[in-house]
Amino acid sequence: TESDRCMNVMPLFHIHGLVGALLSSLSAGASVICTHGFNAPQFFDLMYEFKSTWYTAVPTMHQAILARAEANQDVIKDSRLRFIRSCSSALPPQLMADLEQCFGVPVVEAYGMTEASHQMACNPLPPQIRKPGSVGIPTGPEVAIMDDAGKLLAPGETGEIVIRGENVTAGYENNPKANESAFTNGWFRTGDQGYLDDDGYLFITGRIKEIINRGGEKISPREIDEVLIDHPAVAQAITFAMPHPTLGDDIAAAVVLKQGMDASELDIREFVAARVAHFKVPSKVVFVDEIPKGPTGKLQRIGLAERLGITAELQDKGIVEYVPPRTPVEESLAKMWAEVLGVKRVGINDHFFRLGGDSILATQLVARAREAFNVDLSLVGFFESPTVAGQALMITQLQAYGLSEDELSNLLDDLERGSDQPL
C-alpha cells in the first residue's frame, strides 16, 4: 500500500530486487529504501533508522538475520514490520516458523522467475490461509502441472510446473533450440517439479535438474534439506548428488553447524534415517564453514560435489582399527560383507557406508542374512546398526528370543522401563 516502506537488501541486477522490491513498491505509490546490499550486522540498524514495514530476501539472508535477532530485541520490539517476504529459493517450514516467532508478523513465501517478470505465486497474507512448505496460490499467470508428454495433471499429481499469461516471456532471443524445449502447447516449462493441492496451493518439490537418481529411486534434495535443518546442531544444510560407479547418483549433504554445537557424520545420518525412507539417507555428510552461494545469496546445489571434491569412490575406507570376528555369527557376516562389498576383509566395527555400501547392497546383505540365520531382519534395523558387531548382536538376540525384530524391540523397551509384565 502507499503507507508501506520496503527495505530492499536484494541486488538490483536480479529480478527479485528489481521487480519484487523496487518496482512493486513504486507501482503501489509506496516508498523503498535501497541499501548498499545485504549486510547482516547492519540490518537491524537500518530497519530501526528507516522504520521499514516489510522486506524481502532469500532464505540464507533470513537465517543470517535470525542469528543476530537475540542481540537486537529492542529494535524488534519497536519494529513497524507488518510482514516478511521470502523468494528465489525454498524456505524451510522451520525457518518460516522461527521468523514469525521472532518478529511476530506473518511470513509469505513467493515463487518467481525472470521469465515470468518475477512473481508467479505467493502465500496470501492473513486472514487467508498460509501453508508452510507451499509457495501459495497463483498471482498473475495461470499455473498448471504437466507430464513429460505435455498432458496437464490433476491436483495431487507431481510433474513439471508450467505457466502462461501476459507476464510470461514470449521466448528467448536468437535461441530457437531453447524455445523449442521451453514451450509446450502454449505453456512455458519452468524446469521446476511440483504439484497443486485441492485448494490450488502450489508445492515445489525441486528443480528437475537437481533431482537425485539413486539407482532408479528419484529423490528430491529439498526433502532431505528440511530434515537436516531440523537437527538441533545444524544451522544450514544442502543436499546434492554425487557420482556413484553403480548407482549413477548417490546422496551427499553439506552441513554448517551452529556456533558452539557439535555433531558427527554418524549423528547426522542416524537423525535422517529415523525420519525418511532408508534410500534417502545421505551416504556422505561433510561439514563446512560456509555453503557456496551465488551472487543473489542462493545456495548452489548443482555441481557442488565437484566443487567440494566429493565422489563416492573417495569416501574414506580405513576409518576404524581392524577388529577380527569373535563369534561364528560375526565370521559369517564378515564374509558376506566382504563378498558383497568387494573388499578383502571386514572388521566387526567397520561401518557399512564407510566401506562404500549403499541401499542396494544393504538390501542384498539383509536378504542373505535372513536366509543364512533364519531370522526376521529388517532393512530399517540394518540402517540403524550398520556394523558387523551390531548386526551379529541383533541376530543373536532374535535367535535367542524367537521373536520378530519389532517384537524384540518392544521387549527390550519394556525391560529398559522395568516392565512387570510376564515375559
Image (cartoon, grey):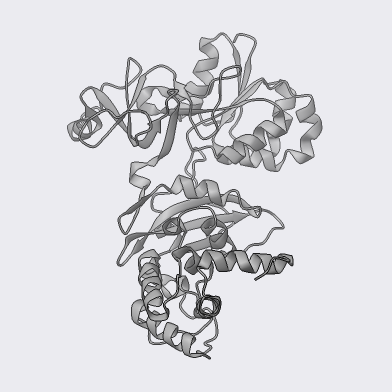
Q: Can residue 292 be seen by looking at this rendering? A: no
The answer to whether residue 414 is left or right of residue 136 is right
Count of marks overlaid on the render = 0
Q: Between 408 and 97, which is closer to the camera in this rendering? A: 408
Query: Where is residue 378 drawn, in percent x and y?
Result: 45, 66
Query: Where is residue 46 drawn, in percent x and y?
Result: 70, 28
Residue 420, quarter of the rendered image: bottom right
Residue 56, quarter of the rendered image: top right
Query: Where is residue 350 drawn, in percent x and y?
Result: 50, 79
**Residue found 39% across the figure and 64% down from its top:** 359
Seen from this angle, which residue lies furthest front? 422
Quarter holding the C terminus?
Answer: bottom right
Query: Where is residue 294 drawn, in percent x and y?
Result: 47, 43
Q: Between 346 and 109, which is closer to the camera in this rendering? A: 346
Q: Is residue 11 above or below residue 380?
A: above
Q: Between 291 and 346, which is closer to the camera in this rendering? A: 346
Seen from this angle, which residue lies furthest right? 74
**Residue found 46% across the figure and 30% down from its top:** 14
The answer to whether residue 27 is left or right of residue 1 is left
Quarter holding the N terminus?
Answer: top right
Q: Is residue 230 above or below residue 142?
A: below
Q: Can residue 257 be seen by looking at this rendering? A: yes
Residue 106, quarter of the rendered image: top right
Q: Is residue 152 above or below residue 167?
A: below
**Residue found 55% across the figure and 55% down from its top:** 255
Q: Is residue 17 above or below residue 392?
A: above
